[in-house]
Image (cartoon, rainbow, N blue to C red):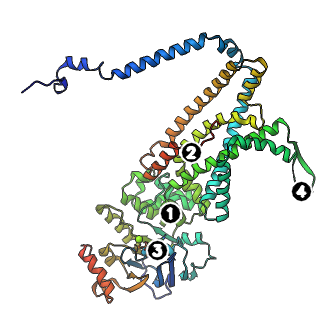
Amino acid sequence: MSVPQTLAAPLLSVRGLRKSFGKSVVLTDLDLDVPEHTCTVLIGASGSGKSTLLRCLNLLEVVDDGVVELDGQDIADPRVDANAIRSKVGIVFQAFNLFPHLSVLDNVMLAPRRVHRVRRQQAESDAVAMLERVGLSDKARARPDELSGGQQQRVAIARALVNRPRLMLFDEVTSALDPELVGEVLTLIRELKSDGMTMVVATHEMGFAREVADQVCFLDGGRVLEQGPPAQIFGAPQEPRTRQFLARIVAAGRL
Amino acid sequence: MTPEPSGAAQPGSAADVIKAIPLRRPGRWIAAFVILVLVVLFIYGAATNANFQWSTYRSYLFDRRITKGVWATLQLTFLAMALGVVLGVALAVMRLSANPVLKSVAWAYLWVFRGTPVYVQLVFWGLFSSIYPHLSLGIPFAHQFAHFDIQSLQAFFFFAALGLGLNEAAYMAEIVRAGISSVGEGQSEAATALGMSWPLTMRRVVLPQAMRVIIPPTGNELISMLKTTSLVIAVPFTGDLYSQARQISGANFRPVPLLMVASTWYLAITSVLMVGQYFLEKHYAKGSSRTMTARQLRVLAKAIGNPDRGGDGA
Ligand SMILES: Nc1ncnc2c1ncn2[C@@H]1O[C@H](COP(=O)(O)OP(=O)(O)O)[C@@H](O)[C@H]1O
Ligand SMILES: [Mg+2]
């Protein structure tokens, strides 16, 4: 189902998004379009609001103002069924947040069984298939704490994918991993992308961003300050703030 | 080179090793011996002291009134505890909810029930009958289909269990709340992100993990409840173990052996409960110490360390 980028209406379209915590305004007047089957990478300094943006897209945060259209439906409207939207938008966090009291298989099966009321047999075979997809079918009976960080993160991805989301959000999913475990998770995300999954990825892995992104968005001052294809953002950034940020990344040896 | 004063540096010297063992902690042995002598003297004294009236003790230990009292005490304990746990979970969830009305109702409940002695609360529940002499269950303005005499013995049993349970709920609420807050925010967030509703998140993700922190102090509460039932005379309910023992001694003027009878039963039941608690804690600790977060360990230590109650035994 590897479909090239189309000119149709984007799967996700954000207009004038605003989000503040008390007096501190984190996102203001933010616009973003994510076409179907593409990968959008968010970059920006720590505290620039990447996590907040992703959490707004998953309705983990209540949006103050603006329109967030997913498949033509405004999900920022307070009248929508938030839980139904969350099933359509998967999110994976920096801290894997697997449920430690459940086996790997039960972690993956929990939402299908309890939210989508899938019958046990069906849920189990779906979960096993998904674990196979992330290369962990042999760990189905293990407890999360018996897995390495990279394996835990892959289970977290399987747990989100099993709901068949339209959009996947990744929030610095490799930041908590030991360096030698980063590769397996990035490889999985690359594979998802070539399967045609639509995704928004916040990351500090600039090499990965350059390779996997269809568009790169630089967040600064609560909005998308600059966006474009990776070659342009990394090769010829227009905004001085973007150049500054990338220079710091280069100085830190991460590009 | 001067020779070493002790044998510590000469591991090969067998004589030194043998000599060192009995001298290691002389204070400990002396203390143990003194205590042992005192215990033997006390037991001998008690056994031969006519004031303990051991023959009376033996004849009443399995007296029908006493065993009925034991049964009533057990019923009170478990009924009150069941009410306390269920209501306590509800109160804890209310206190942690975002709804300000639920929050303040729960807060006020804890304020009242933790801030007054359980003995006083039991007296109040007894007086309930003088406020509402006849309690009717039924649809207003329709036919009364249930009607029970509020002054009967069953009514006093009911009020005793109710009073103990409502008081217990306030303490259980704090234990459950500590358990729930020991589960990291990331857990409920991950569940919510999967589309799980709040009640579902609580039931399937948060409460099962909170159990590890909730179970040990709840065991303590159960044991504590068994002993607190001896206060139900305040209602006044007189069917429990302690009241039965008092009633018998009131008739035969032998309080000491009957107190010993009651104590024996309380001790026997708490011992059984403590064994159960030991295995339950072992079960919940199984393979979980590794996944128990520092935060959970801290909360657990706190929950066990400060039982946080003054009225125990009044
Ligand atoms: N729940 C919250 N309450 C208050 N402030 C928050 C909260 N979450 C994030 N912030 C603030 O919002 C800003 C953006 O945070 P975040 O979205 O985590 O940035 P990033 O992921 O890019 O590092 C930060 O200044 C942070 O302190
Ligand atoms: Mg972040």
Q: Give coordinates of residue B13: x percent, y percent.
A: 17, 20
Across and down, in percent, residue B80 comes to 69, 41
Q: Is mark 4 within 8 Å of ligand 1?
A: no
Q: CA distance from mark 4 to mark 3?
A: 53 Å
Pointer 4 or 2: first along the chain: 4
Three-letter code, disc 2: Asp
Q: CA distance from mark 2 to mark 3?
A: 40 Å
- Give the image quadrant in which the ligand numbered 1 is located: bottom left
Q: Secondary structure at mark 3?
A: helix
Q: Amino acid at mark 1?
A: Ala
Estimate the x, y position of residue B224 in percent, counting from the top left: 61, 37
Q: Which residue is mark 2?
A: B308
Quarter of the image for residue B121 reads: top right
- For image coordinates 67% across by 46% down, the residue present is B116
User: Under tag 1, what secondary structure?
Assistant: helix
- The residue that mark 3 highlights is A52
Q: Secondary structure at mark 2?
A: loop
Does residue B264 appear left or right of residue B132 in this picture?
Answer: left
User: Going from the N terminus, do you reach mark 1 or mark 4 first?
Assistant: 4
Which chain does the residue under circle 2 lie in? Answer: B
> Is disc 4 on the same chain as disc 1?
yes
Residue under label 1: B190
**Is circle 4 on the same chain as circle 2?**
yes
Closer-to-camera residue (A214/B111): B111
